[in-house]
Amino acid sequence: MSVGVAILGSTGSIGCSTLQVLARQRERFRVAALTAHSNADLLERQAAEWKPAYVGLVNGESREQGAGSGASCLVEAATRADVAIVVNGIVGAAGLEATLAALRAGKRVALANKEALVMAGELVTRAAREGGGEIVPVDSEHSAVLQCITGRRPTELERLILTASGGPFRTWTPERVAGATVEEALRHPTWRMGKKITVDSATLVNKALEVIEAHFLFALPYPAVEVVVHPQSVVHAFVEFVDGSVLAQVGFPTMELPILYALTHPERVPDAGARRFDPVAAGSLTFEPVRPDLYPAYGLGRAAAVAGGTAPAAFNAANEVAVELFLEGRIRFGRIAETIARVLDAHRPGDAGSLAAVLATDAEARRLAREAACS
Ligand code: NAD
Ligand code: MG
């Protein structure tokens, strides 16, 4: 019997990579549900190829028979009886409710949508505990950590070092970065991804989100989650154990491996399509500290993490709004970090133990961010 997979955000970068992985694993997995935001044409082509039992289009009318629509189609797809694994490849806060619903329904969530865990880490981990669901990271750094710690006891784990490529502005001056264009910000040196995460990689907000993600996934305090800049993106993370031993997971940058691993963890299955590692082709591997002057938003994210409660949700919402405005050409690159700083200055962190509190923080931070960004 093959395992039923729902792909939320099937038309995006993670969604398309997931289908590429599944095309080589047809005997193990079957696509039970696909959802997208508004790309009806691509969704239709995917549905024609994969014949899922359920298709959902959030924004617009799908021509598929019996297709779901509106935001509720995400929860419908994620909680279906014929779905065992939900790949959440939605970008941003829109992915939160489906993640909670899937975990409460006892599903495995292969989670690329890190924003959900950042906004509502307590709620998401509680939903998994209470519903019997399981969160398995798709993010390459967290997949690397999981691969290194699988089979070990949590008490043996001491410290994580996540790697960051440093993005396209690693060698620029802070003054030049502040005026970077959209085109320059979207020119990522090592990864091809959706626009939002590509901008997040240029500000290093992505790494701050990943620090928070790691804190909730692996139950580590923030000082034990470090970051190092590694421009080649070959080492995905280092894991230090209590005896001082360090393991790392390495490979050429591709999301297909972490996606496949999230589907099969703790097992590994053959994958004929995977690009094999070659250390000589990888060449020299270098590591540098994070420069706070170059990536001010990274420090803001770490501070929000330590503040805890609703602060990470405010950080995430402010960033989502600022990135959108930047991509629309309405604010300069340097304004992204400034906007986040203004929102966090105004935010009084509260308890993040209820969905209502998290969503209220999200809405208020978005309002403040729009005001701060454009004034
Ligand atoms: P993307 O922009 O390429 O795709 C986003 C997908 O989400 C699309 O299918 C879109 O239809 C859907 N979507 C967007 N808004 C939605 C909404 N309001 N409701 C429902 N669906 C909506 O983004 P991506 O690069 O695939 O990233 C997706 C997530 O995975 C992000 O959280 C990102 O941080 C994470 N991630 C991506 C990569 C990567 O290599 N692309 C790597 C690690 C983590
Ligand atoms: Mg990552």
Image: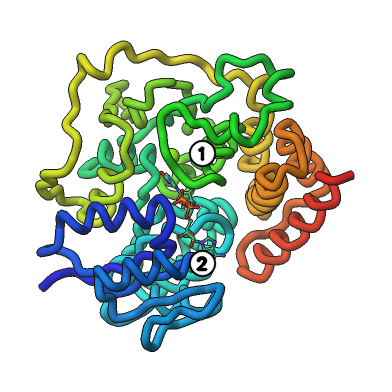
Q: Amino acid at mark 2?
A: His
At 85% across and 46% down in the image, what residue appears? 374
In the rendered image, the vertical position of residue 72 relative to residue 85, given as above or below: below
**Front: mark 2 or 1:** 2
Element at badge 2? loop
Disc 2: residue Cβ within 8 A of ligand 1's nearest atom: yes
Left or right: 340 with respect to 279? right
Seen as rendered, the residue at the extreme right is: 375
Instruction: Say whether residue 161 is visible.
Output: no
Give the residue at mark 1.
211
In the rendered image, the vertical position of residue 331 relative to residue 318, given as above or below: above
Q: Position of residue 201 (x, y in %)?
A: 53, 35
Element at badge 1? helix
Disc 1: residue Cβ within 8 A of ligand 2's nearest atom: no
Q: Amino acid at mark 1?
A: Val
Q: Position of residue 10 (x, y in %)?
A: 39, 62
Q: How many marks?
A: 2
Using the numbered discs, state the Cα–Cα distance from disc 2 to disc 1 in whole angstroms.
28 Å
Q: Position of residue 29 (x, y in %)?
A: 18, 65
At 52% across and 67% down in the image, what residue appears? 38
**Which class describes the residues within 10 Å of circle 2: few (<14), some (14-19), or many (20+)?**
many
Left or right: 355 with respect to 54? right
Quadrant containing the C terminus in the rendered view: top right
At 56% across and 64% down in the image, what residue appears? 94
In the rendered image, the vertical position of residue 9 relative to residue 166, given as above or below: below
The label on residue 37 is 2
Instruction: Identify the image quadrant of residue 200.
Output: top right
In the rendered image, the vertical position of residue 346 relative to residue 202, given as above or below: below
